[in-house]
Amino acid sequence: MKRASGILLPVFSLPSKYGIGCFSKEAYKFVDMLKEAGQSYWQILPLGPTGYGDSPYQSFSTYAGNPYFIDLKTLIREGLLTKKECKAYDFGDREDCIDYEKIYKARFKVLRKAYERFKPDEEYEAFVTENAFWLEDYSLYMAIKDKNGGVSWNEWEAPLKNREEAALEQARRELADAIGFYRFQQYEFDRQWKKLHAYANKQGVRIIGDIPIYVAFDSADTWAAPELFQFDENNEPTGVAGCPPDAFSATGQLWGNPLYDWEYHKKTGYEWWIRRIEYCFRLYDVVRIDHFRGFDEYYSIPYGEETAVNGKWMPGPGMELFRAVEAKLGRPEIIAEDLGFLTPSVLKLLKDSGFPGMKVLQFAFDSRESANYLPHTYPTNCVVYTGTHDNDTTRGWYHEVGKPARDFAKEYMCKPRLDEDTLAGDFIAMAMSSVADLCVIPMQDYLGLGSEARINIPSTLGGNWVWRMKKKEFDKETVREIARVTKLYGRMPECDQDV
């Protein structure tokens, strides 16, 4: 990886029309401004369809795309919708915040109108055939889920829950129209994303995608292939994922995702994982894998527990999985999310894999962090961030963090005082000047925003995943400043270094 930089901005945070960021003209404009600012990467969050809690890390499918990201204006141009129809729905009127309840109630109604006018062609049929290995299960899953009032598959009647063929065939007949609607959504998502992705690449901008290590229990993945997971004879989890208690959380983090049956995956030659990663590289140029530690050891919490206190560490697949991936796919560009407490065996796995790990500057000054994130300790093979989607903004960090951390930051930065108006710029300069091959800065830090622009507070429900960048907030002056810093620290694309 050459010395370069990029910006972290979720698709939903773009200032698109109709209540949420999407694959609209604003996305293309953002790519143009990234290029102008000398950025080589755009990092996004997972693109999957979201459910309760709106988290992109709890998706109904590891393959499907979020229909909220389909640009309605494109459908208008294609004659599938009219402006009047789109204006008739309330998508939320705040330009800086997403109202997911209104989006949920309006988006599927307007997409249904587009579907009713849609005429399948050869391109559509090719998409359905090529993606049948996940699309058919997903579309059927969502159609049955809708019919059952949105409840998870473990609450369906036994023949459907257990995928008895006669029950599935009856559902396919009765729900054919709904299944077709979900296929249509995925086709439009795929078309629009591929076009945007190709445009970004043409402009010299590569996409860093993000995949959670785990899938959601309420997903087509677990329903369609329960043998992949640690389920009992009734298809109920025996253990679920999370993190143990630490200095940040006295009861740990209970994520609730089903755990993989790694022995089964090993018997198949890790076929499911190879296919999943291969599919990711159809969508993205680089893939960040969340919670990399889980491949070395994973924290197993007994199903039904209310906290993560009573979990235990269990062995993961280790390098065997990544050797299997490399044998089939070569050496894909993967970033390992290796944050948190790292044991010697995790560090060895990271070293053996050759994947760059992550360094987060906000953690560098926090005494609760056991790892060393100070810039003078970085190897070149890493990706440095001022913060991630799970951190406060740097300006927000200034108010949130305690006096010892602020004092240490002042000492390290050789500053008599910290100024909240300039701190984000100071952190950006520290990250950009480090030896890390890649530096990725959240858009909010370039804009100097506070805690109101935070994306997510881990282990909380409500108020997350809602921040949106306002129109014209990313202006020419900001572009020039980003370009100046990027050039100063030698992160411009080679052809632009002398500009």
Image (spheres, rainbow, N blue to C red):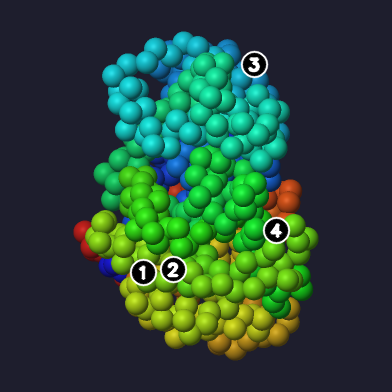
Q: Identify residue for label 4.
A: 303
Q: Are marks 3 and 4 in contact (CB under 8 Å)?
A: no
Q: Are marks 1 and 2 in contact (CB under 8 Å)?
A: yes
Find numbered disc 2 in the image and state the secondary structure of the residue it sits on. Answer: loop
Find numbered disc 3 in the image and state the secondary structure of the residue it sits on. Answer: loop
Q: In the image, 161: left or right of 180?
A: right
Find numbered disc 1 in the image and state the secondary structure of the residue it sits on. Answer: helix
What residue is rendered at 68% in x and 70% in y? 311
Query: How far apart, in angstroms, are the residues tagged by discs 3 and 4?
Result: 45 Å
User: Residue 430 in the image: x percent, y percent?
Assistant: 48, 76
**Mark 3 or mark 2, whichever is nearer to me:** 2
Query: How far apart, in angstroms, are the residues tagged by discs 1 and 2?
Result: 6 Å
What residue is rendered at 37% in x and 55% in y? 268
Find numbered disc 4 in the image and state the secondary structure of the residue it sits on. Answer: loop
Disc on the earlier residue, 4 or 2? 4
Disc on the earlier residue, 1 or 4? 4
**Mark 3 or mark 4, whichever is nearer to me:** 4
Q: Identify residue for label 1.
A: 320
Q: Callout 1: few (<14), some (14-19), or many (20+) C-alpha neighbours within 10 Å?
A: some
**Mark 1 or mark 3, whichever is nearer to me:** 1
- State which quadrant residue 17 falls in: top right
Please give the label number shown on residue 88: 3
Q: Quadrant of the C terminus?
A: bottom left
Disc on the earlier residue, 1 or 3? 3
Please give the label number shown on residue 317: 2
* Name of the residue lying farthest toward the left: 495
Image height of 332 relative to 376, above or below: above
User: Residue 191 in the image: x percent, y percent?
Assistant: 37, 31
Q: Callout 2: few (<14), some (14-19), or many (20+) C-alpha neighbours within 10 Å?
A: some
Q: Callout 3: few (<14), some (14-19), or many (20+) C-alpha neighbours within 10 Å?
A: few
User: Residue 210 in the image: x percent, y percent?
Assistant: 46, 54
